[in-house]
Amino acid sequence: MVDTAALAPAIRRANSKALEILLQGDPVLIDVVPAKDLIPELKEHTILHAGPPIEWDRMCGPMRGAVAGVAVFEGWARDLDEAGVQASKGCFDFHPNHHFSAVGPMTGLTTCSQPLLVVENRAAGNRAYCTVNEGLGKVMRFGGNDESVRDRLAWIRDSLGPALGSALQCCGGIPLRPLVARGLTMGDEMHQRNVACSSLLLRELAPALASAVADHSDLSEMLAFMGSNDQFFLNIAMAMGKSIMDPVRNIEQSTVVTAMTRNGTDFGIRISGLGDEWFTAPVEMPAGLYFPGFSAADANPDMGDSTIVETIGLGGFAMAAAPAVAGFVGAGSVAEAAGITARMREITLGEHPEWTIVSENYQGVPTGIDIRLVVETGIVPTINTGIAHREPGIGQVGAGVVKAPMACFEKALRALGERLGIS
Amino acid sequence: MSDENDSPAIGRVCAELLQSRPRVINVGLAVFAIDLDAQDVDVVHVDWRPPAGGDEDLARLLSMLAD
């Protein structure tokens, strides 16, 4: 017989522990290392992807395009057509990034030779990984796969990645907690606006990078690449989010969300009290603004591991800190941006003590999503996102806002009830 | 509690209610508050909806798991 009166206090204690671990997270960007050296399971023909588990036959257009592109990039196929045939014949092993301490934006593909950013959470002792941001437009994370995309990936693998690794080793790593705190006060929300954090990072990294790269022409190219990419910091923020949330997993009876992610077909969440089980529902379409020449008819449904940023209280949750992004993603006025953050406070358990919002009198960003609050209030997480073209090979067509599907949270709550013997 | 004892008081409240300008607390559907506001009625809207969107099973589950 279940003692139902004891359940709520037990959940409260579990969630208090989860929130404490979350808020103590101390992420430091320490290195850039080839993926195969970090993830032993990442062999030839193994592809990690964004979102919950998915196989080739259910993958959306841009995910398929990126798979074909990365197979050519890794030398597993001679061209995109051959790569597509191989994929349809089951020649590749697909697994979620999340199963290997990793995350990836949009299609999120991670393969053995790509260099990964390494973020160490010094409070919990774990590490998390993410690929290096490729820039905007036609890039692999948005389904781009032509020669220009693959050449850029090769340059990141052969030049930028090793240089960044040397620079980070040289400077002893870059603490991210204070950097993000500063970025928030400068108008970033760390999902669709990373202008401030990318600039702050470059400022800290440039001296060490100059020491690490002997050739001035190479150095100039790297600085120009990073300096012209407003979203360079996004992938770092994602590895940071993963490093903060992974230690929150597996706290018995906790209702705190430890991951939210999408593969372009399904949206999936995990909660602490139910370990690594995924609760999925069909992804929704973002509502947003489109680059010239594109419209909603071109858009692919929601995609990417980047929702790890919202999971820790940034992105859409910190919309009030980034009024400029509200316009960029079509979320409306500054007041409406503040309203989104206010609604996120209704489904979270606490506020970050150092990541504060100036316009809200230095109130901390809302963090620690509780599935009970989501289901009770009917308020689902708001996510800022890029929008990929629905066809393979084209790339980014816009940016917008999307909701997490309520069904994920309802499924998780029912499963928790079953686990606790009260379904 | 006695209806007879309360009657005069209730009567006074009802009379006041009918003779003064209405002041409304609207709970749930916002459209009622919007209409009243358009007619210059003092109205405060409370954004409320049934827990779990009215799903009885989920609401029962929440009642056992929530603080």
Image (spheres, coloured by chain):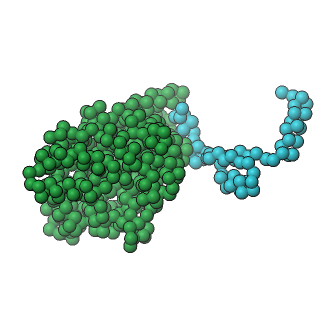
Chain colours: A green, B cyan
Q: Residue at x 44, y 47 (%)?
A: A321
Relative to A370, B2 lies left or right:
right
- The residue lying toward the viewer, choosing from A275 and A236, is A236
Relative to A165, A263 lies left or right:
right
Percent of width and height locating residue A318: 43, 46
Q: Residue at x 46, y 35 (%)?
A: A350
Relative to A142, B14 lies left or right:
right
Relative to A286, A25 lies left or right:
left
Residue A109 visible in rendering: no
Percent of width and height locating residue A154: 16, 59
Q: Residue at x 28, y 53 (%)?
A: A232
- Number of on-image labels: 0
Q: Residue at x 47, y 34 (%)?
A: A421
- For residue A73, what is the image quadrant? bottom left
* Image vertical order of residue A186 relative to residue A108, above or below: above
As drawn, the residue found furthest toward the left would be A214
* Image vertical order of residue A372 relative to residue A392, above or below: above
Quadrant including the N terminus of chain B: top right
Percent of width and height locating residue A245: 34, 39
- The residue lying toward the viewer, choosing from A29 and A87, is A29
